[in-house]
């Protein structure tokens, strides 16, 4: 009976906390993904710059 009363009283709060934890996890995952994307973009720019320098070196 006590469990039922607690569930009725705090059940919504427990569910809300669970949803907030899921959102927190999702936002962390998105932050990690954006960091990986940023590193990938920087690597692509570095490769383009390296390719340009190599082509100038070959033209000399």
Image: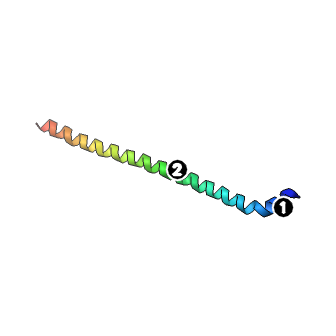
Left or right of 36? Residue 14 is: right
Q: What residue lies at 21% left-to-right and 43% top-to-bottom? A: 52
Seen from the viewer's position, the closer of residues 53 and 3 is 3
Labels 2, 1: front one: 1
Which part of the image, by quadrant, shows the C terminus? top left
Would you place residue 39 above or below residue 15 in this image? above
**Mark linked to residue 29:** 2
Within 10 angstroms of label 1, few (less than 14), some, or many (20 or more) residues? Answer: few
Q: What residue lies at 53% left-to-right and 54% top-to-bottom? A: 27
Spot occupied by residue 30 in the image (x, y as percentages of width and height): 50, 52
Decide which of tag 2 and tag 1 comes sooner along the chain: 1
**Mark linked to residue 5:** 1
Q: What residue lies at 30% left-to-right and 46% top-to-bottom? A: 45
Would you place residue 59 above or below residue 29 in this image? above
Structural distance between the alpha carbons of marks 2 and 1: 36 Å
Left or right of 21? Residue 9 is: right
Would you place residue 46 above or below residue 1 in this image? above
Left or right of 15? Residue 27 is: left
- Give the image quarter of residue 51: top left
Left or right of 7? Residue 46 is: left
């Amino acid at each position: 009976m006590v469990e039922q009363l607690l569930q009725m009283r705090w059940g919504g709060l427990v569910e809300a906390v669970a949803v907030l934890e899921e959102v927190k996890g999702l936002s962390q995952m998105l932050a990690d993904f954006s960091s990986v994307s940023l590193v990938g973009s920087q690597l692509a720019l570095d490769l383009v710059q390296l390719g340009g320098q190599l082509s100038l070196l070959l033209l000399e």
